[in-house]
Image (spheres, grey):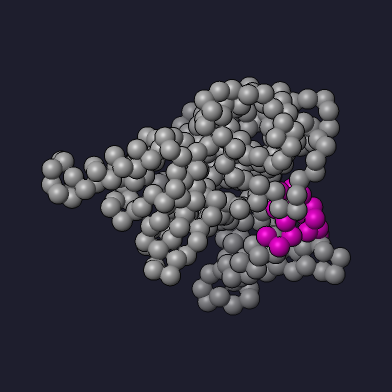
Amino acid sequence: MSSRVTAGDRLRRILAVLPWVAERPGVTVSEVTERFGIDRDELLADLNVVFMVGVYPYTPDALVDVSIDEDDHIELRLGEAFRRPLALSPAQNLALLAAGAALLATPGTDLDGPLARGLSKLARAIGADPERDLSVDLGDAAAGTQRELLGGALESDRQVRLRYYTLGRDQAEERVVDPWLLRNEAGHWYLAAYCHRADAPRTFRLDRVLDAEVLDEARRRPPPEDPSLSIRPDDGSPVVELRVPKAYGWIAEAYPVESVVSGEDDTLLIRLAISGEAWLSRLLLRLGPEAQVVSAPTELLAAGIAAARTVLARYDGTVS
């Protein structure tokens, strides 16, 4: 089972890939996939979307053009409209600066590349100091140091020793892993890796990594063709199944889910890992009385029942 890639994830990836490719005419498909931790099919699908990017009147000169030759070399050509400076308001400039800073946090982005240089020019033009005036949060701040360390391990193909807090068992455990991919999902950073203790792929939430050490030993297990498929909850997180109306399909976009199955009665069966009883209760209260807990660990069933009673009481008018 795999985590769904949201439209936001894909857009951030495309916006990170394009400037990197544009500055490297003739870069190969394999170089791009290795740099950004994606497979060939994902890259080609992204480039097919780029073909449709442009401005009115959508003639060839107003669209982005991408070609791949028989040796897998990529050529990216931007239309003239992308070369003209934009007249942006102060609010738009600040929003652009914040969005660009978020993109720089995407694994694989060149921190000295055209995006970084462009943001530096933009900051000077509007008189902003990003270090002082701007704070972009893509997850828990405590995970930032670990993300930097793990990013270095990925670059050097080294193993990492983690001291990791497993929520389901309420204890910290030491593991040695071969890191594969760093990724942000629904506001949290995750590491997909091969865990030697479990002898299987595992996913670790960075805000639960209590300590990390890059080892001298080289990574033994190479990443799979698509390491993003390994992004799934760690083995200690409680897993629940919810049956909800199809209109609640946004759950699969908002949270990393293990699976989504469509029913014949216009419902969805969604399987997802949760952080605990309080989180499940909040989700059920948000979903209302049409959400049904199909399966859950015994200790969490009470949360579902309590949340259901609260929802019903609200609809009866007995709870304000």
Instruction: Kindly identify the residue that appears in the image at 78 percent across and 25 percent down.
Output: 215
Instruction: Kindly identify the residue that appears in the image at 13 percent across and 43 percent down.
Output: 318
Residue 301 at what x, y percent from top left? Answer: 38, 40
For the residue pair 95 and 245, the one nearer the viewer reads as 245
Residue 162 location, quadrant: top right
Does residue 228 show up?
A: yes
Depicted 1 relative to depicted 216: above or below: below
Q: Is residue 174 magenta-colored? A: no
Residue 208 location, quadrant: top right
Residue 216 location, quadrant: top right
Instruction: Kindly identify the residue that appears in the image at 56 percent across and 34 percent down.
Output: 236
Residue 53 at what x, y percent from top left? Answer: 58, 67
Q: Which residues are magenta?
A: 24-42
Residue 160 at what x, y percent from top left? Answer: 73, 28
Q: Is residue 31 magenta-colored? A: yes
For the residue pair 82 and 269, the one nearer the viewer reads as 269
Depicted 169 relative to depicted 25: above or below: above
Instruction: Kindly identify the residue that appears in the image at 57 percent across and 51 percent down.
Output: 3
Does residue 152 show up?
A: no
Image quadrant for the C terminus?
top left
Residue 188 at what x, y percent from top left? Answer: 52, 39
The residue at the far right in this view is 71
For the residue pair 263 and 133, the one nearer the viewer reads as 263
The residue at the far left in this view is 317
